[in-house]
Image: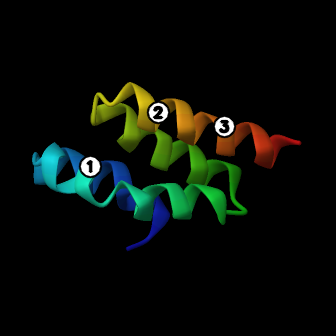
Amino acid sequence: MDDLSVDDFISKLKDNTLILQNKDVLLDRLKNNESAYGILIIMNGVKMLNDKNLFDEGGCYCCQQKN
């Protein structure tokens, strides 16, 4: 799946539990992404999941990419 469609996929799937069981995939995409816009789109999707720990961990990857 393209990074730019992650948030759309999450909003249409409407199954946060299933996605959160595979949150390592999202974190891996954030960690290895070289596109700032792609990271922001993925983080929008992560935000929709309402999981504070996942959002915080994703935010750490965003800050690492910024540096």
Residue tagged 1:
20
Quarter the C terminus occupies: top right
The 10 Å Cα crowd at callout 2, few under 14, some 14 to 19, many 20 or more, is some
Which sits earlier in the primary sequence, circle 1 or circle 3? 1
Instruction: Judge left or right: residue 5 versus residue 39.
Output: left
In the image, is residue 58 above or below residue 38?
A: above
Q: Are marks 2 and 3 in contact (CB under 8 Å)?
A: no
How far from the left and from the top, in percent, is residue 27?
Answer: 51, 55
Label 1: which secondary element: helix
State the image coordinates of residue 15 (x, y, percent, origin top left): 10, 48
Residue at coordinates 43% horizontally, 38% vertically from top-left? 54
Q: Amino acid at mark 2?
A: Phe
Please report contact status of discs 2 and 1: CB closer than 8 Å, yes or no: no
Whether residue 32 is situated above or below residue 37 in the rendered picture: below
Q: Secondary structure at mark 3?
A: helix
In percent of width and height, residue 17 lies at 14, 47
Q: Give neighbour class at mark 1: few <14, some 14-19, many 20+ (Cα, 10 Å).
A: some
Q: Which residue is mark 3?
A: 60
Q: Quadrant of residue 30?
A: bottom right
Tell me the kind of residue under disc 1: Leu
**Measuring 67% from the left and 45% from the top, which residue is drawn there?**
61
Can you give x and y, in whole percent of width and height, for residue 23 in the image?
A: 36, 54
Q: Residue at x 20, y 44 (%)?
A: 11
Q: If you read the primary sequence from the N terminus, does the residue marked by circle 2 or circle 1 appear first?
A: 1
Q: Which residue is denoted by mark 2 in the rendering? A: 55
Query: Which of 17 and 37 lies nearest the eye of the viewer?
Result: 17
